[in-house]
Image (spheres, rainbow, N blue to C red):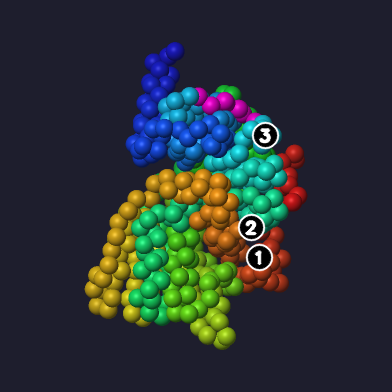
């Protein structure tokens, strides 16, 4: 082993130990004693890198779960995944490179999908068809049609599907919603979500050969065949049209999800009906700051208009993306604010603050946003068959639609009109064409439900 490779190996090994130790510390006593074998869920995890590494470690540490199998196309990531699970639960899982083996395994109860966006829908739908419950990362699919198909599969086969928008289970988020539900904000018409945390440039790297041992054709799956580029692969795939949904579908989905939740709660506190889908969406922005190969915008403002009731006033939800600014907005790098005529509330990832007239601080609370309680909520609902906090049909998919519809409005360059029932754009062939892929590359076609 060369000195360079040895340093890389040691660095990777240290990262595995650090990540596993951090997750174990977060899990606390949950991993101390496993439930009896016949009471534990057998879990199969597709994806072992990035966010997925946290997911597999968290599931492995729960008393009610055994991570029986992990799957990844990258042999290096797969070996690290096996190791972190072994550290978290005391025994190693089986390692696979073909996710279909997990779908077909009758001993698995749950599938965890921690893959890039373009690989969310197909494993989720197949898992539902195989009678398994699913925890899938956000957004629900690569595009609107995929999300709809995932909901159809969940509904048809009676499965529990939780999307990874963990704010839905965080204690301080729920406390903020409880505060809003008292009606303290008064009449609310506007909410805003934002991302203002500075990111970096992807540069203009040349295409190259895939890393040794990677089946890149299979990694692309349903996406079009393209030459390998390191910035279209691990971690950075999300910035390209064919693979991800940009930062709107990356971080934006979290902020839009709890902004939508809070806005709807404020409307209901005044006797209104829950908000469902917006009917008008417009977006302005572009790649205005970074000179790199990213396709999605780095500067964006999206406006969503929800219709009023019985000729009453509508509601506006705005999303702002400024991923080049080195400062916060309303004291938060990313968050949401709900404006009422009696007060407003600022909700961040780890705290919320409510203000009255003249910006007087009326209430506040802090908390974490690590996602462990969200995973526990999913496991509890798999056992009880109750609807989880980020149920795909009622929570995860509607929030994902906001991201996809916002991206579509930006790509067509004008306001689009959404039919909330069909989730299609009214009299707009150009926008509707962007609701799905032009083609799914065989054999990875979207399953029929």
Q: Which mark is residue 144?
A: 2
The reply to whether residue 13 is in sight is yes
Q: Circle 3 sits on which residue?
A: 106
Element carrying mark 3: loop
Image x and y of residue 283, in percent: 53, 66
Report the magenta residues as a range: 92-98
- Depth check, mark 3 against mark 1: the one in front is 3
Element carrying mark 2: helix
Q: Which mark is residue 246?
A: none
What residue lies at 71% left-to-right and 47% top-to-bottom?
446
Q: Quadrant of residue 1?
A: top left
Q: Label 3: how many residues lie within 10 Å, few (<14), some (14-19) or many (20+)?
A: few
The reply to whether residue 292 is in sight is no
Q: Which is more N-terminal, label 1 or label 2?
A: 2
Image x and y of residue 215, in percent: 63, 29
Give the Cα separation between the discs numbered 3 and 2.
30 Å
């Amino acid at each position: 082993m060369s000195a360079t490779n040895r340093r890389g190996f040691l660095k990777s090994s240290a990262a595995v130990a650090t990540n596993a130790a951090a997750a174990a510390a977060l899990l606390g006593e949950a991993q101390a004693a496993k439930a009896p074998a016949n009471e534990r869920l057998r879990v199969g995890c597709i994806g072992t890198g990035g966010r997925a590494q946290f997911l597999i470690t968290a599931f492995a540490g729960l008393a009610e779960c055994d991570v029986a199998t992990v799957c990844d196309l990258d042999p290096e990531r797969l070996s690290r995944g096996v190791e972190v699970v072994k550290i978290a639960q005391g025994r190693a899982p089986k390692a696979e490179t073909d996710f279909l083996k997990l779908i077909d395994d009758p001993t698995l109860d749950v599938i965890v999908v921690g893959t890039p966006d373009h690989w969310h829908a197909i494993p989720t739908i197949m898992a539902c068809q195989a009678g398994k419950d699913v925890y899938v990362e956000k957004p629900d699919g690569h595009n609107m049609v995929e999300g709809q198909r995932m909901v159809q599969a969940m509904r048809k086969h009676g499965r529990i599907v939780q999307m990874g928008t963990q704010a839905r289970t965080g204690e301080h988020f729920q406390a903020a919603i409880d505060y809003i539900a008292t009606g303290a904000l008064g009449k609310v018409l506007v909410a805003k979500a934002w991302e203002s945390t500075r990111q970096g440039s992807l540069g203009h790297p040349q295409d190259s050969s895939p890393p040794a041992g990677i089946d890149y054709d299979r990694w692309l799956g349903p996406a079009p065949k393209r030459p390998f580029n390191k910035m279209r692969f691990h971690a950075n795939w999300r910035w390209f049209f064919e693979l991800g949904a940009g930062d709107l579908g990356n971080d934006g989905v979290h902020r839009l999800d709890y902004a939508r939740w809070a806005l709807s709660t404020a409307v209901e506190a005044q006797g209104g009906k829950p908000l469902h889908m917006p009917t008008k969406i417009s977006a302005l922005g572009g790649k205005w700051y970074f000179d790199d190969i990213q396709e999605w915008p780095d500067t964006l403002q999206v406006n969503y208009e929800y219709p009023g009731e019985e000729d009453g006033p509508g509601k506006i939800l705005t999303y702002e993306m400024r991923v080049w600014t080195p400062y916060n907005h309303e004291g938060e790098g990313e968050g949401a604010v709900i404006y009422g005529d009696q007060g407003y509330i600022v909700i961040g990832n780890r705290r919320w603050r409510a203000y009255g007239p003249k910006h007087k601080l009326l209430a506040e609370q802090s908390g974490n946003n690590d996602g462990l309680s969200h995973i526990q909520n999913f496991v509890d609902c798999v056992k009880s068959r109750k609807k989880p906090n980020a149920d795909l049909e009622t929570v995860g998919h509607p929030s994902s639609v906001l991201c996809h519809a916002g991206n579509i409005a930006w790509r067509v360059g004008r306001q689009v009109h959404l039919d909330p029932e069909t989730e299609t754009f009214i009299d707009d062939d150009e926008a509707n064409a962007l609701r799905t892929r032009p083609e799914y590359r065989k054999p990875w076609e979207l399953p029929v439900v």
